[in-house]
Image (spheres, helix red, strand yellow):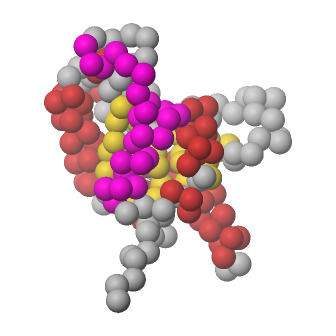
Amino acid sequence: MSREAKKAPAIFLDRDGTLIRDVGYLYRQEQVEILPRVAEAIRLLRGQGFLLVVVTNQSAVARGRLTEEELGRIHDALNARLAQDGAQLDGIYYCPHHPTEGVGPYHSECDCRKPNTGMIVKAVADLGLDSSSSYVVGDQTSDMELADRIGAKGVRIARELVVGGDSPGSKHPVVTDLWQAAEWIVGDLKQSSGR
């Protein structure tokens, strides 16, 4: 009798403003600038047993600023640069659509544009993930809404913490970068397991 394999927890990562500098519409590999301590944070989280999965809205495709092939080359460059620092992503999922702007089939209401859950559903099916024991890390409200929708814990990155910006009663912790998010997640794991 076969037992169902245990599903892996994941860290679902936003791309722009979380892993790499947000330059507006990124459409060239040369624009990819990995933020400080990102590779170190990825290694720390991988060491805790998480799979690392990027989920990113990329409406630049819908707007005709780059093709999906060009986006693929940008993601290949991102993976290669992280690998040089001993860090590895387990998947990159993107939404090329936009509900009000765009051309052809990319101009659409879809189930994958965050905070919709389509990218997560696909990643869960592809990689055997357990979204309820996962975390979502990103710098947008839509990332935190996504966390809530899939039953994961959200960690919000706000590079410039503004006094009074996030209320103390916010249910999502606010940190300044991915390294702080990783430290918070490790602490949360220890607290949850009583270690």
Q: 181 and 40: which one is in front?
A: 181
Residue 124 part of the magenta-drawn span:
yes
Asked whether 77 or 152 is in front, the reply is 152
On the question of residue 74 being in view, the answer is yes
Q: 182 or 111, which is in the foreground?
A: 111
Q: Indicate the position of residue 38 as horizontal and vertical percent values.
A: 43, 49
Q: Position of residue 194 (x, y in %)?
A: 71, 78
Q: Position of residue 34 (x, y in %)?
A: 37, 40
- Residue shown at 74% from the left, 45% from the top: 171
The magenta segment is 104-127
Whether residue 90 appears in this view of the structure is no
From the image, which quarter does the C terminus lie in? bottom right
> How far across and down, in percent of the image, does residue 12 sit?
47, 49
Q: Is residue 117 magenta?
A: yes
Q: Tell me the quarter of the picture where residue 112 sits.
A: top left
**Residue extending furthest toward the front:** 1
Residue 124: image quadrant is bottom left
Relative to residue 112, is residue 98 depicted above or below? above
Q: Residue at x 65, y 72 (%)?
A: 190
For the point 56% across and 62% down, the residue is 133
Q: Is residue 106 left or right of residue 99?
A: left
Residue name at image x 75 percent, y 33 percent:
166
185 relative to 92 in the view: left or right: right
Number of marks present in the image shown:
0
Give the quarter of the figure containing the N terminus.
bottom left
Name the side, left or right, on which 176 lies relative to 124: right
- Relative to 178, 46 lies left or right: left
Q: Judge whether 134 appears above or below 94 on screen.
A: below
